[in-house]
Amino acid sequence: MTKKSHREIGNDGEDLACAYLESKGWRILERNYFFEHSEVDIVAYDDTAIVFVEVKYRTNTKFGQPFEHVTEEKVQHIFKAAEAWMYERKMEGSPMRFDIVGIVQKKNEAPEFNHIEDAFR
């Protein structure tokens, strides 16, 4: 069995996060939106706002909770990509927020979700 790449592991986490958000009635608008060197993992709509979601997926908490790995630099990149996404779709001024979905999935266990709404401004 070959070891998964960092990107493949990230996609697994994003798949889980999308299924989780959809189970809450959210619509997934886009995944992996890139603008210059900035990325948003998931762009979704929850009936109140456009939500830009950062997904952090881990197999254990040895190095802390997944959400603890969202750096200030990453936040700035998310802001930049979100601004570009809204501009490209002529949606500036629409309600929006930034969430984090942290997922811990230990071997042979169901994933645990920690959804932090309005995680940063």
Image (cartoon, grey):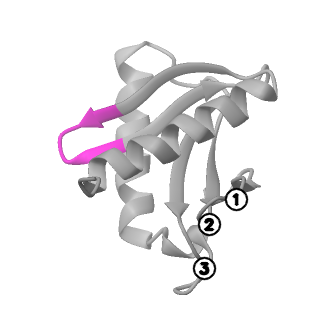
Measuring from the top left, give residue 29's x and y in whole percent: 53, 18
Please tell me how crowded label 1 is: few (under 14), some (14-19), or many (20+) other residues with Cα within 10 Å.
few
Q: Earlier in the sequence, mark 1 or mark 3?
A: 3
Image quarter of residue 23: top right
The amino acid type, in three-letter code, at marker 1 is Glu
Between 11 and 55, the one lying in front of the other is 11
Q: Could you give the CA–CA distance between mark 2 and mark 3, rounded to whole angstroms?
A: 9 Å
Q: Which of marks 2 and 3 is nearer the N terminus?
A: 3
Residue reaching furthest to the left? 36
The amino acid type, in three-letter code, at marker 2 is Lys
Could you tell whether 46 is left or right of 108 in the image?
A: right
| Residue indicated by mark 2 | 106
Quarter of the image for the C terminus: give it: bottom right
Q: Could you give the CA–CA distance between mark 1 and mark 3, rounded to whole angstroms?
A: 14 Å
What residue is rendered at 60% in x and 26% in y?
A: 44
Q: Is residue 68 magenta?
A: no
Q: What stretch is highlighted in magenta?
A: 33-39
SS under mark 3: loop
Measuring from the top left, give residue 7's x and y in whole percent: 29, 48
Image quarter of residue 86: top left
Could you tell whether 64 is left or right of 82 in the image?
A: right
Q: Could you give the CA–CA distance between mark 1 and mark 2, rounded to whole angstroms?
A: 5 Å
Measuring from the top left, give residue 95's x and y in whole percent: 68, 29
What residue is rendered at 49% in x and 68% in y?
A: 70
The amino acid type, in three-letter code, at marker 3 is Thr
Residues marked 1 and 3 touching at CB (< 8 Å): no
SS under mark 2: loop
| Residue indicated by mark 3 | 61
| Residue indicated by mark 1 | 109
What residue is rendered at 59% in x and 64% in y?
A: 107
Say if 53 sits above or below 107 in the image. Answer: above
